[in-house]
Image: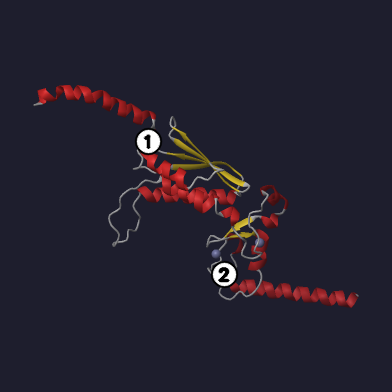
Amino acid sequence: MIKNMFPFFLQILPIMKFVREFVINNPLCVCSDEIAAVKKDLIGEHDKMKLKQDSSHVLLKIVQEQYFMNLKIMVPDKYPLEQVSIEASESNFPNLLKVFFVGQAVEIARKCVQPPLKPNKKDPPFKPRVSLREVCEFLIKDCVKRYPLEICPCCKDRVMLRDPEEVAKDPRKRVERVYCGHLYHHGCLAKYMKTPPFKDGKFCPSCGKRIFHDKWKVTPELAEARWAHKQARERELAEVTDFLS
Ligand SMILES: [Zn+2]
Ligand SMILES: [Zn+2]
């Protein structure tokens, strides 16, 4: 029987060698379905996608109006058992958002291959899954395409100025991101956080969640006291002005 199969082996060996060489020379073929789906569903006419087979990278340039971000996504040898890695190179997004986008994308990729630390007993056993598409969907749809269109909950204007160069001229227009995920102009948020009511904290006008931000860690009592102090000072100044006029 084995003797009869010998010619068959002779035929199949070159095919196996070809397949092996093809996979080595085209490492991105392990995620070709995901790449096709990203191209079809997420890449717009002004965006660019390039595959670098020699270094196993997917390069993306994603554009939304005047804003852009260049992303380099590396697919490791052991994909999909290992997650993709992400790097944002050139971009004109505020650094705060760039750091947030990449940090969250890395976390999404990690969750694709590592079981949760506290698994829910009702969930089925953890199985690693492919991470490229999930990461691209987050970075393109939920970040680069979304944030330039966000509206400031206070002044109802675009948070990210239509001309990215303008932000440097006016620090009040700097972007702040609060815990619920909504973006504000720095000046608008500063004013809102210092204006009553303060009872139980300040809440995001867009989603109703309490606002937490490193720059405004003030208890409602202290915010109330500061407001009262500011009002008293303004009254004093008004009296002095009246007296002098
Ligand atoms: Zn605003
Ligand atoms: Zn919110």
Element marked by disc 2: loop
The residue drawn where x is 45% and y is 36% is: 57
- Residue on which the image places disc 2: 203
Amino acid on which the number 2 mark rests in the picture? Phe
Residue 157: image x %, image y %?
Answer: 66, 60
Residue 127: image x %, image y %?
Answer: 30, 50
Residue 120: image x %, image y %?
Answer: 32, 61
Residue 11 vs 211, above or below: the answer is above
Q: Residues within 10 Å of mark 1 (few under 14, many from 20)?
A: some
Element marked by disc 1: helix
Looking at the image, residue 85 sits to the left or right of residue 9; the answer is right
Give the Cα distance between marks 2 and 1: 48 Å
- Residue on which the image places disc 1: 29
The quadrant of the rendering that contains the C terminus is bottom right
Which residue is outermost to the left?
1
| Residue 234 or residue 95, whichever sits in front | 95
Indicate the quadrant where residue 214 lies: bottom right
Residue 130 vs 152, above or below: the answer is above
Residue 77 vs 242, above or below: the answer is above
Amino acid on which the number 1 mark rests in the picture? Cys
Mark count? 2
For marks 2 and 1, the one nearer the N-term is: 1
The residue drawn where x is 34% and y is 52% is: 115
| Residue 235 or residue 120, whichever sits in front | 120
Looking at the image, residue 64 sits to the left or right of residue 55; the answer is right
Closest to the camera, between mark 2 and mark 1, is: 1
Looking at the image, residue 28 sits to the left or right of residue 176; the answer is left
The residue drawn where x is 31% and y is 29% is: 19
Q: Residues within 10 Å of mark 2 (few under 14, many from 20)?
A: some
The residue drawn where x is 62% and y is 55% is: 175
